[in-house]
Image (cartoon, helix red, strand yellow):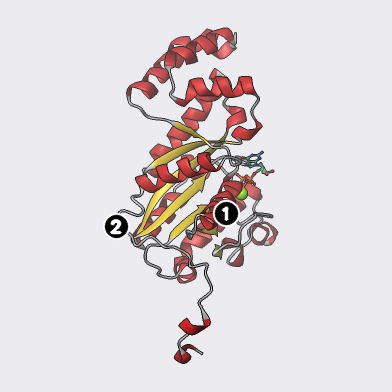
Amino acid sequence: MRYAQLVVGPAGSGKSTYCSTLVKHATDTKRIIEVVNFDPAAEHFDYEPLVDIRELIHLDDAMEDEDLQFGPNGGLVFCLETLLENCDWLEEQLGDVDDDYILFDCPGQIELYTHLPVIRKLVDTLEKWNFRICVVFMIDSQFMVDGAKFLSGTMAALSVMVNLELPHVNILTKMDLLSKSARKQIDNYLDPDPHILLADMRNSNSKWHEKYAKLTESIGEIIENFSLVRFYPLNIKDEESIDNILLTIDNIIQYGEDADVKIRDFEEPEPDDIDENDI
Ligand SMILES: Nc1nc2c(ncn2[C@@H]2O[C@H](COP(=O)(O)OP(=O)(O)OP(=O)(O)O)[C@@H](O)[C@H]2O)c(=O)[nH]1
Ligand SMILES: [Mg+2]
């Protein structure tokens, strides 16, 4: 079995930072986690990718091509479709390593996850290669601090869940940036209670709420009754917070249960231990 996290979410939500944070955390705990960059427009990230889609196709290739003439959004979809058509390339780059653990750092274009088929097809391919996958949907906690925003973030998470049909974890990122009062507000939403949500919407005097109070209430109740969406807070400056998230996802993909957990051997071999045949 192979293990993977498909790291998705809106632009700038903290996907690449999450990947580099996990890689560092893994190194500190003597574990191996690799990252594959699936973002053809990426300019900067703080990890050394195992595979980089930009070596196959870069967004500029799609935008600057005289025949294609894509804009940034269509170009991005085109690049991912090109990746799909070149699965052999990806398979070769990934190698065939049993029990490996890979984060796929995806682009920040939300429609790739909410309704377009290309990521779902990539997932099917990864599953064929024996990957057990958890979708990790990132959302910036700063955009979740009132009832209306929370509702909209929840619906986005739900669309991704329905479209990708995989085990799924929602993460509230950038918790370190929240003020004390915002943090308190978010705590109310971690275990969403439709009544708190409704009270919040009522107090906000929003036009939406005036018109659609009953709809908001029903959506809130559906989410609660079916335990549909839950958010986990992540503070990348707190090792315990990182550890909790990793543990939750490991449990979901059953990492370590039937795997030979890979531990990096950081100790240099003693000179006496080196077999002459190795030299
Ligand atoms: N303080 C703080 N900043 C963060 C955190 N996560 C991300 N950032 C910052 O937010 C910005 C966007 O982060 P990225 O990790 O590039 O986000 P992304 O989702 O990969 O963005 P795209 O790939 O462009 O969609 C960067 O300036 C990061 O330094 C966090 O947990 N705390
Ligand atoms: Mg990124």
Residue 111 position in % (x across, y down)? 52, 41
Vertical relation: 12 (above or below) 3: above
Residue 236 position in % (x across, y down)? 59, 42
Task: In this rendered view, identify the residue nearer to me: 190 or 67.
Answer: 190
Is 171 left, or right, of 174 in this rendering?
A: left
Total label count? 2
Q: Residue at x 55, y 14 (%)?
A: 208
Question: Dot 1: within a 10 Å radius of its alpha carbon, few (fewer than 14), some, or many (20 or more) residues?
Answer: some
The N terminus, quarter of image? bottom left
Question: Dot 2: within a 10 Å radius of its alpha carbon, few (fewer than 14), some, or many (20 or more) residues?
Answer: few
For the question of whether residue 107 can be seen, the reply is: no
Q: Residue at x 51, y 40 (%)?
A: 240
Is 277 left, or right, of 13 in this rendering?
A: left
Residue 200 position in % (x across, y down)? 53, 12
Task: In this rendered view, identify the residue nearer to me: 127 or 257.
Answer: 257
The type of residue carrying mark 1 is Lys
Quadrant in which residue 226 is drawn = top left
Q: CA distance from mark 1 to mark 2?
A: 24 Å
Residue 95 position in % (x across, y down)? 44, 70
Vertical relation: 105 (above or below) 88: above
Q: Which label number is shown at residue 258? A: 2
Quickly name the residue at label 1.
24
Q: Residue at x 43, y 54 (%)?
A: 4
Name the outermost residue toward the front: 272
The type of residue carrying mark 2 is Asp
Vertical relation: 16 (above or below) 203: below
Q: Identify the secondary structure beneath mark 2.
A: loop
